[in-house]
Image (cartoon, rainbow, N blue to C red):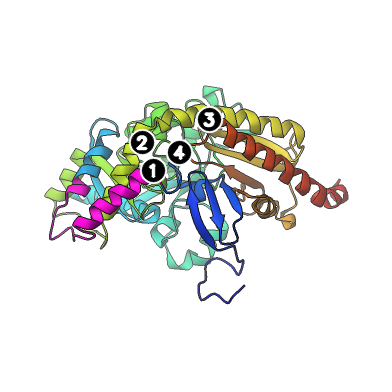
Amino acid sequence: MTRSHLFYQSRQRRPVLDQARGVYMWDVDGKRYLDGSSGAMVCNIGHSNERVLEAMRRQMEKSTFGYRLQFETEASERLAARTAALCPDGINRVFFVSGGSEAVESAMKLARQHALAIGQGTRWKVISRTPSYHGCTLGALAITGYAPLTDPFAPMMREMPKVPAPRAYLDGLDPDDPATGAHYAAQLEACILAEGPDSVLAFIVEPVGGASTGALVPPAGYMEGVQAVCRRHGVLLILDEVMTGAGRTGRFLAGEHWDMDPDIIVLSKGFAAGYVPLGAIAARDGLVEAVLDGGGFLHGFTYAGNPLACAAGAAVIDEIEAQGLVANAARMGGALRARLDGLMDRHAIIGDVRGRGLLLAMEFMADRDRKTPLPAHLNVHQRIVDIAFDMGLIVYSRRTRDGLEGDHIMVCPPLIVTETHLDEITQTLDAALAQLGREIAPALSETV
């Protein structure tokens, strides 16, 4: 390959992308790949949707930029109204950004400025969970619980308090028992009391876990429990829907599965489905009004409310609704889950299959009964990605247990998938897992 002037996480090179249509992508050599992870759980409506592209063309012919302090734009007003209509009652104010990390930072700063505006300046701590991932900027990393990503920057940031993620499957608890959810919610309350309720500003949580926990579905009663704890102590509840939002879990917002009533919602990824960089926070009217009355929101980005981005975002929502993609995510998610369960029956290294809608994951273990992780040096999470990629299937992986050990892959295709696509995903995964099993068998036999 020719020398690249780009650099990202590592020296690993990948094929050059030529084009993408629907659920498929092609490199310049003509090899086809099924996008089984929607990129990084982004491309919810599939690639190169002509109606979205046409909406972008129409906007480009009018304007591609209008600075928010100088102009209002029809595109940003339309998307804000559409977004508010899809949020719970009372969440009617929207602030646009360019991505998930920016959205998380914005939510934290809005929460802090609200505390100052209402005379609660002692509140500044944002509690989150471990493991968790909320973004790569220093503020977002401070509430991220994933050691490989946070430890190098610890001297540069003020780390925030953490509570354990409700990993009932690893802790040996029944996820269907409301007592399990109450157990983990009580850990949040204990943390608030230990930190001092008057110092705690907010609790941020992904309704269904993302890459750090591998599509962790909370146990029964957990989401309702943490909401009650937050209300009891005057702590703002922030739902990080960057990965779960825009229909991914079978509801437009994953919080809808539990009738959640948050104070702030964070959106990105599938919100614009990869057509443009776009994210948003949606917040309660009273919260925003207090901040504006207190002198204004002291925060902003150059491309906030960019009309081209907002036109694309509105067109994405149009497509989600016109094609019934939220319902399809629920339907195809159930079908894909059944297929992944079938793979678990065939491959002993699959220790757990979990998720909601088309946000699904498989965790690999040396012993599924004892929940023993595979030896870390095998790098199974990366190896399975590489094998599947060579076979023409794209999946996404991370380490499950605080980023230090444990392996899982995310299987999250675009919401437009059909049964035929699911068959292709399953067949390719089956072959990839068989090859992986052969490769690691000698190492596993040495550990027995």
- Who comes first in sequence, dot 3 or dot 4? 4
Amino acid type for the residue under numbered disc 2: Cys
Position of residue 342 measured from the top left corner of the image (x, y, whole percent): 69, 30
446 with respect to 400 (left or right): right
C-beta proximity under 8 Å, tags 4 and 1:
yes
Considering depth in this image, is 35 or 9 the residue closer to the camera?
35
Q: CA distance from mark 2 to mark 3?
A: 34 Å
Q: Is residue 168 one of those drawn in magenta?
A: no
Q: Tell me which residue sits at (45%, 38%) in the image.
A: 188
Q: Residues within 10 Å of mark 4 (few under 14, many from 20)?
A: many
Amino acid type for the residue under numbered disc 1: Phe
40 with respect to 83 (left or right): right
C-beta proximity under 8 Å, tags 1 and 2:
yes
- The disc placed on residue 226 is none
Q: Quarter of the image for the N terminus: give it.
A: bottom right
Q: CA distance from mark 4 to mark 1?
A: 9 Å
Q: Tell me which residue sits at (57%, 59%) in the image.
A: 148
Considering depth in this image, is 253 or 19 the residue closer to the camera?
19
- Who comes first in sequence, dot 4 or dot 2? 4
Helix, strand or loop at label 2? It is helix
Question: What residue span does the magenta drawing correspond to?
Answer: 49-77
Q: Is residue 246 above or below residue 219?
A: below
Helix, strand or loop at label 1? It is strand
For marks 3 and 4, give the one nearer the viewer: 3
